[in-house]
Image (cartoon, rainbow, N blue to C red):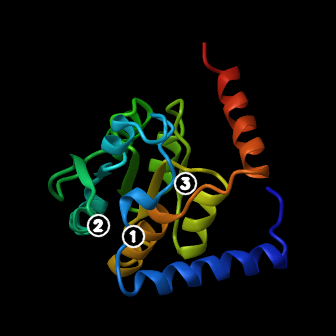
């Protein structure tokens, strides 16, 4: 992974500050986010899918999932809650797979998965072709994962971040557009690697 230079860090910080200041008065509107790859711009299918966020968690992320479900609804998104629905112990791969499957099959525009650390769910989600999952733990990682990597699944570690930070990460991630340009070339290379192993 190449290092980020000072100029890039300053640009990221400036974008984050603009987004945070802009969100102080109002929540981001779903329609302002980057277009869904599942449908052509302006189509009815796009408008419908861009409102759907698949949301999942294991037992460690259950409480944060419930909090974020309310936040997403307040932002105007339709939430497809795939579970879990209690604090009873479950296995995170089952839920991460379902969130990723819904995104990959265009049944959800984006996906959010929460477990204790966010790492395991990220690994699982990235096994599903067509998914680019990224774990975010602060504003910068949320912006970077969208702007540079065009992530369509976000994973969070409930044991690492609090509810308020999680809300801001989610709002930032959902409202940050993909940067395109040189990043598009790199996304295409990621897809090419994936295709090499699809048999």
Q: Seen in the image, is 79 located left or right of residue 34?
A: left
- Residue 88, horizontal then vertical, whole percent: 17, 54
Residue drawn at x 15%, y 56% as measured from the top left = 86
Residue drawn at x 26%, y 69% as measured from the top left = 71
- Residue 100, horizontal then vertical, whole percent: 41, 39
Residue 117 visible to the viewer: no
Q: Are marks 2 and 1 in contact (CB under 8 Å)?
A: yes
Report how far apart the C-alphas of labels 2 and 1 lie in the structure: 7 Å
Instruction: Please tell me which residue lies in front, 24 or 90.
Output: 24
Q: Is residue 79 above or below residue 68?
A: above
Report how far apart the C-alphas of labels 2 and 3 lie in the structure: 21 Å
Report how far apart the C-alphas of labels 3 and 1 lie in the structure: 20 Å
- Residue 128, horizontal then vertical, whole percent: 49, 32
Residue positioned most to the top: 199
**Residue labelled with disc 3:** 134
Disc 3 residue crowd, few under 14, some 14–19, many 20+, Cα 10 Å: many
**Residue labelled with disc 2:** 75
Q: Is residue 196 above or below residue 158?
A: above
Q: Are marks 2 and 3 in contact (CB under 8 Å)?
A: no
Judged by depth in the image, the label closer to the viewer, 2 or 3, is 2
Labelled disc at residue 28:
1
Disc 2 residue crowd, few under 14, some 14–19, many 20+, Cα 10 Å: some
Residue drawn at x 41%, y 66% as measured from the top left = 170
**Does dot 2 land on a helix, a strand or a loop?**
loop
Disc 1 residue crowd, few under 14, some 14–19, many 20+, Cα 10 Å: some
Residue drawn at x 30%, y 61% as measured from the top left = 60
Q: Are marks 3 and 1 in contact (CB under 8 Å)?
A: no
**Does dot 1 land on a helix, a strand or a loop?**
loop
Residue 147 visible to the viewer: yes
Q: Is residue 138 above or below residue 112?
A: below
């Amino acid at each position: 992974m190449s290092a980020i230079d000072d100029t890039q860090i300053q640009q990221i910080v400036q974008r984050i500050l603009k987004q945070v200041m802009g969100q102080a008065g109002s929540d981001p509107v779903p329609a302002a986010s980057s277009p869904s790859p599942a449908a052509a711009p302006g189509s009815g299918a796009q408008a419908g899918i861009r409102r759907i966020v698949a949301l999942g968690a294991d037992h460690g992320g259950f409480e944060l999932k419930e909090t974020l479900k309310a936040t997403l609804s307040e932002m105007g998104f339709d939430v497809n809650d795939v579970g879990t629905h209690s604090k009873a112990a479950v296995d995170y791969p089952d839920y991460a797979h379902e969130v990723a499957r819904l995104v990959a099959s265009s049944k959800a525009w984006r996906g959010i998965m929460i477990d204790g650390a966010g790492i395991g769910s990220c690994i699982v989600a990235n096994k599903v072709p067509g998914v680019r999952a990224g774990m975010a733990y602060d504003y910068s990682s949320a912006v970077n994962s969208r702007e540079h990597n065009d992530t369509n699944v976000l994973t969070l570690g409930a044991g690492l971040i609090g509810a308020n930070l999680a809300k801001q990460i989610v709002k930032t991630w959902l409202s940050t557009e993909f940067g395109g340009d040189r990043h598009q070339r790199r996304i295409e290379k990621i897809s090419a690697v994936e295709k090499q192993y699809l048999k």
